[in-house]
Image: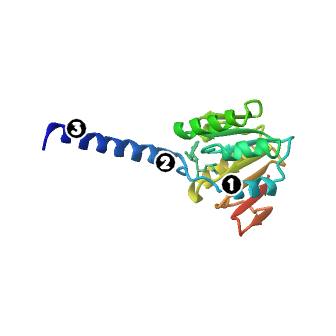
Amino acid sequence: MTLEEVFLILAIELCVIVFVVWIAWSGILGAPWLPTPKSKVRAMLEFAKVNANDKLYDLGSGDGRIIVMAAKEFGANSIGIEVDPLRLFWSRLAIRRNKLGEKVKVIRANFFKVSLEDATVVTLYQGHEINKKIRAKLDKELKSGTRVVSYRFILDGWTPTKMNKDNSIYLYIV
Ligand SMILES: C[S@@+](CC[C@H](N)C(=O)[O-])C[C@H]1O[C@@H](n2cnc3c(N)ncnc32)[C@H](O)[C@@H]1O
């Protein structure tokens, strides 16, 4: 084996390790990136009756599709919280492309460390176990009347106000 081949193999191995750590990192903090289909995003926002008076937070905002649609089609002010720098980059591009800089922002942070006290709507697509921790945070921080919309996973211990089983959407009003 030549020296070039050894370097090539090492470079490939390094890329694989970086990729795995990257995926695992957001997987440790919460769910890894898996985008909600846009038709379901629209259904979530309609389900929660999102409107221009709302301040919406998406917990783990991925490529920004929920925060962008909430502002563009429903007039809400929206904030995404995301740990993955690549998703953050894509969501900032989407915000700029849609000229939504006044209404939408995205924060690079662990959503457990961001206060949600001024939210009127919270959206999330996380996982069964992590939702238990998220529910405890929401219990502590959300003001009465805040709508919480979860895609695919319920929030254990809360009874959904409304659910759309075909689309796997659960709405809670705190
Ligand atoms: C299943 S994806 C959902 C993305 C987006 N909300 C959507 O519906 O298309 C979950 C996202 O949460 C992010 N995430 C996981 N844990 C997080 C945490 N503790 N703080 C911030 N972002 C987190 C992941 O990086 C990933 O982009």
Q: Residue at x 70, y 47 (%)?
A: 66
107 relative to 165 in the view: left or right: left
Find residue 114 and report its image quarter: top right
Q: Residue at x 84, y 52 (%)?
A: 49
Amino acid beneath label 2: Ile
Q: If you read the primary sequence from the N terminus, does the residue marked by circle 3 or circle 1 appear first?
A: 3
Q: If you read the primary sequence from the N terminus, does the residue marked by circle 1 or circle 2 appear first?
A: 2
Gap in Å between the C-alphas at discs 1 and 2? 25 Å
- Give the image's coloring scheme: rainbow
Mark 2: secondary structure: helix
Q: Which residue is mark 3?
A: 7
Q: Which residue is mark 1?
A: 38
Residue 147 in percent (x, y) is at: 79, 51
Amino acid beneath label 1: Lys
Residue 11 in percent (x, y) is at: 29, 39
Q: Which residue is mark 2?
A: 28
Q: Is residue 19 above or below residue 157?
A: above
Residue furthest toward the left? 1
Residue 81 in percent (x, y) is at: 63, 39
Say whether marks 2 and 3 touch (CB < 8 Å).
Answer: no
Q: Is residue 141 above or below residue 35?
A: above
Mark 1: secondary structure: helix
Q: Nearer the viewer, mark 1 or mark 2?
A: 1
133 relative to 122 in the view: left or right: left
Question: Quick check: can you spot residue 84?
Answer: no
Q: If you read the primary sequence from the N terminus, does the residue marked by circle 2 or circle 3 appear first?
A: 3
Amino acid beneath label 3: Phe
Q: Residue 124's mark? A: none
Residue 68 in percent (x, y) is at: 71, 42
